Amino acid sequence: MDTDITLSPSGFNHIPVLFAESVDSLEVKEDGVYVDCTAGGGSHSAAILERLKNGRLICIDRDPDAIDNLTARFSGDKRVSVVHDNFFNIKNILQGLGITSVDGVLADLGVSSYQLDTAQRGFSFHNEGPLDMRMSRQGVSAQDVVNNLDLAELSKIISAYGEEKFARQIANAIVKARQSKKIETTLELADIVRNAVPAKARRDSHPARRTFQAIRIYVNGELDGLENAVKDMFECLKIGGRVSVITFHSLEDKAVKQVFSSLSKGCTCPKNFPVCVCGNKPRAMVFKSVSPSDNETQKNPRARSARLRTAQRLL
Ligand SMILES: C[S@@+](CC[C@H](N)C(=O)[O-])C[C@H]1O[C@@H](n2cnc3c(N)ncnc32)[C@H](O)[C@@H]1O
Ligand SMILES: [Zn+2]
């Protein structure tokens, strides 16, 4: 598939990961109903639309900038409904549109290249900007988090969501720095992190990468409720419909894998029961997970940690 399609006419650009693989995984039907839960720049949506004839596509995003872009990009296409919401509300969103079930749901988790590259949004440790990181532009910002959470909470977040082994040192440095001056910008935080880790940890990737990821995940509540959201995505499918999720973090992948695996097992009887008494049948067929090729990771380092998982509803 030609990835130039990713260049949105409005300049809202995103380099998608596992692009062809994820669109192919949905086996789009010409008259089907599809949901792009994280429509962003609209490249996955555009590829789905190319395969739809009389079908329908619901594009969801929680970022108002993405919504402006999607509205401009797809306005005039009667098959498309653009919805500004958190896809964790997928059941209500579809209900509000009068849709009872769909043929396919796609979620491409995490942040867009646009969000990372727009300094004002405060996601990047490379570009100076306000320490914001809110996809929805509402609620608690990264600045609130680093200036208000206590040492233990900060350390826990950086360790769990950032998988950062120097979490305690970094949290200590943040707490110390904010005693003399409120931490207000991305580069202030990046410097605090860089100075908190041992010199050898500064060699590989940027030392602030994991801390920024952790704070972003916390600010946007990306993992709280993800399992439920994946269950809801599955429940919205017609029999035979498919859900595909692209994850970028091991905890996201674990959540998706767990939900799919329990749907594919069916039986919920305790392991020591000699025979099944619950009678539950497998509700999903789960496909082998897909990782990006070496070629893709070389071209786009953001693809390194990506994983695509797909399940098809059987019951
Ligand atoms: C990795 S980008 C997806 C890009 C998109 N697939 C494309 O082709 O341009 C993730 C997008 O999902 C949005 N997003 C992330 N979590 C979301 C959530 N829980 N609900 C709605 N949108 C979300 C972000 O605002 C961002 O625009
Ligand atoms: Zn059973």
Image: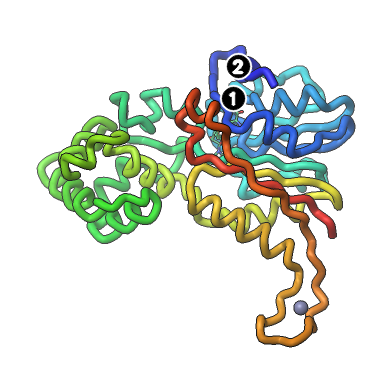
Query: How many numbered circles does the render carry?
Result: 2
Which of 137/277 is in front? Answer: 277
Residue in view at x 32 percent, y 35 percent: 205
In percent of width and height, residue 122 lies at 36, 31
For ligand 2, the image quadrant comes to bottom right
Residue in view at x 54 percent, y 24 percent: 15
- Quadrant of res 244: top right
Would you say 91 lies left or right of 31 here? left
Most extreme residue toward the front is 294
Looking at the image, is 216 positioned above or below residue 112? below
Quadrant occupied by the C terminus? bottom right
* Residue 92 visible to an observer of this rendering: no
In percent of width and height, residue 297 lies at 50, 30
* Residue 168 visible to an observer of this rendering: yes
Residue in view at x 27 percent, y 46 percent: 146
**Kind of residue sitting beneath label 1:** Gly
Residue that label 1 marks: 41
Task: State the mark number for residue 8.
Answer: 2
Task: State the mark number for residue 279.
Answer: none
Looking at the image, is 170 positioned above or below residue 71? below
**Kind of residue sitting beneath label 2:** Ser
- Quadrant of res 194: top left
Q: Earlier in the sequence, mark 2 or mark 1?
A: 2
Q: Secondary structure at mark 1?
A: loop
Q: Is mark 1 within 8 Å of ligand 1?
A: yes
Q: Residues within 10 Å of mark 2 (few under 14, many from 20)?
A: some
Q: How is the image coloured?
A: rainbow
Residue in view at x 71 percent, y 86 percent: 273
In percent of width and height, residue 161 lies at 40, 51
Q: Is mark 2 within 8 Å of ligand 1?
A: yes
Q: Secondary structure at mark 2?
A: loop
